[in-house]
Image (cartoon, helix red, strand yellow):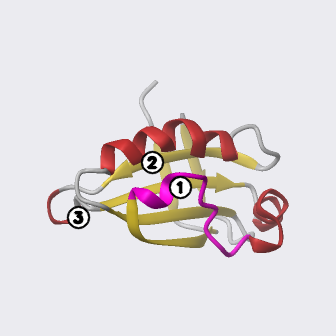
Amino acid sequence: MHMTQNAMDGGMILRLFTVQVKEGRADELLAKFATTSADVVQHEPGNTGYFYGKGISQDDGTVIFASLWEDMEAVKQRFGENWRESFIPEGYDQLFHDYSVSHIQLNSGWHIQFED
């Protein structure tokens, strides 16, 4: 897979959910990301993918779930009028103590290349 974007055309949107997990709960939350969170975004109109992971070393209490969207309209269509807020599925809040959601416009300067 190879993706490149250089044009200043508004670009894709990265929706980034960042959490500070409770001690020893990171792997449990990642398992939920692989199923429940994936189900929230995959196959939705305008979603072009997602990924998740956890911090290392001094950031080992940080876990992220990121989804990629064609544009802001696709994000709003999926999450509705509360698109600026985190969508927290049932049971997630027992695994972390702080969270945020950010929307990043990927309008230039990114390049992703994965080996097939």
90 magenta-colored: yes
Q: Position of residue 97 (x, y in %)?
A: 38, 69
User: Is disc 3 placed on a helix, strand or loop?
Assistant: helix
Above or below, 19 relative to 84: above
Characterize the local packing of mark 2: few (<14), some (14-19) or many (20 or more) Cα atoms within 10 angstroms: some
Where is mark 3, residue-wise? 59
Q: Which residue matches tag 1?
A: 66
Rounded to the nearest whole Å, what is the CA distance between mark 2 and mark 3?
15 Å
Picture residue at 45% right of the left edge, 48% below the top: 52
Residue numbers of the magenta segment: 83-95
Q: In this view, does 60 lie to the left or right of 26?
A: left
Residue 27 position in % (x across, y down): 32, 43
109 on left or right of 106: left
Whichever of labels 3 and 1 marks the residue nearer the N terminus, that label is 3
- From the top left corner, tell me how far across and down residue 47 is, in percent: 72, 48
Q: Position of 16 compared to 96: left or right?
A: right
Earlier residue among tags 2 and 1: 2
Question: Is the stretch drawn in magenta largely helix, strand or loop?
Answer: loop
Question: What amino acid type should be assigned to the residue bearing mark 1?
Answer: Ala
Question: As displayed, is residue 41 above or below residue 105?
Answer: above
Q: Which residue is drawn at 76% across and 73% down?
A: 82
User: Between disc 2 and disc 3, whose residue precedes?
Assistant: 2
Q: Quadrant of the N terminus?
A: top right
Three-letter amino acid code of the residue under disc 2:
Tyr
Is residue 85 found left or right of 20 in the rendered image?
Answer: right
Report how far apart the C-alphas of labels 2 and 1 lie in the structure.
6 Å
> Circles 2 and 1: CB distance less than 8 Å?
yes
- What separation in Å lies between label 3 and label 1 (alpha carbons)? 17 Å
Q: Residue at x 27, y 57 (%)?
A: 55
- Per the image, the residue denoted by label 2 is 52
Kind of residue indicated by mark 3: Asp
